[in-house]
Image (cartoon, rainbow, N blue to C red):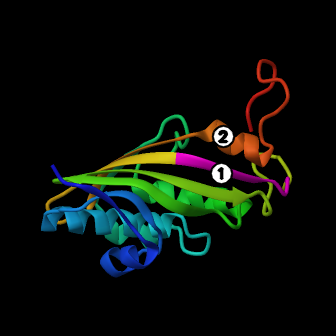
Amino acid sequence: MSKINSLSEAETVKRFGVSKEIKNFPSDLAAEEERNVKTVLGYMDIAYSPTHSSAAAVEKFCAKGSTFDARSTFPTSHTPQEYADSHSHVMSSLKDLHIIQFDVVIPKGNFVALRYTATGSHIGEPHNGIKATQRRGQWTAAGNFLLDDEGRITHWWKDWDKMQMWKGLGWVRPNNDETEFA
């Protein structure tokens, strides 16, 4: 079994081209796993960029016919490309949204699992009718990616601590039993 280490921001830039620390990362990867991590981190870097996130910008990371599943958080997004477009709308409300760090990145063959911590402030456009609260939230999210033999994403399952985010941003309305969430 491979030893678990951390990678500094500088080490992650050198190895994968993404400037985020990885707190828990296996020490020995096969070449295929190294390539797959580079694909996933590259996708995440663009999908979480307030100025670059779009379907067109992430297309190079995705296999033809790729799929996305995050029913509880992005129910109308069915591809990683649609997620990037949908996420750009969230980022219009959270102008400073960014990933703080990758808490865990674990590749195995054509599979990459990751968990990350993100933060952002509601300083932009209204979100579902809620005007900018000026409040900051921090939350964790996880993704499980399946990649093809060329290192492109074929499927992504995503889940995140949406209530932690909403509470920090001031988006939870006072009576959950009588009022729809934002």
Q: Which mark is residue 60?
A: none
Q: Mark 1 or mark 2, which is nearer the start of the sequence?
A: 1
Name the amino acid, label 1. Gln
**Residue with the most extreme top position:** 177
Secondary structure type for disc 1: strand
Compared across the picture, whether 24 is left or right of 112 comes to right
Q: Residue at x 54, y 74 (%)?
A: 52
Compared across the picture, whether 119 is left or right of 124 comes to left
Q: Residue at x 54, y 64 (%)?
A: 48
Compared across the picture, whether 122 is left or right of 158 comes to right
Measuring from the top left, give residue 127's x and y in whole percent. 76, 50
State the residue position of label 1.
138
Compared across the picture, whether 42 is left or right of 37 comes to right
Cα separation between marks 2 and 1 = 7 Å
Secondary structure type for disc 2: helix
Measuring from the top left, give residue 154's x and y in whole percent. 27, 53
Name the residue nearer the viewer: 134 or 53.
Answer: 134
> To which quarter of the image does residue 15 belong?
bottom left
Whether pointer 2 and pointer 1 mark residues with C-beta atoms closer than 8 Å, the reply is yes
> To which quarter of the image does residue 44 belong?
bottom left
Name the residue nearer the viewer: 3 or 126.
Answer: 3
Q: Residue at x 45, y 67 (%)?
A: 21
Q: Looking at the figure, which quarter contains the C terminus?
A: top right
The range drawn in magenta is 133-140
Counting other residues with Cα less than 10 Å from the Cα at mark 1, is it few (<14), some (14-19), or many (20 or more)? many
Asked whether the viewer can see residue 5, the reply is yes
Relative vertical location of residue 46 with respect to residue 157 in this rendering, above or below: below
Magenta segment main secondary structure: strand
Measuring from the top left, give residue 113's x and y in whole percent. 33, 49
Task: Confirm whether the magenta stretch covers residue 131.
Answer: no
State the residue position of label 2.
164
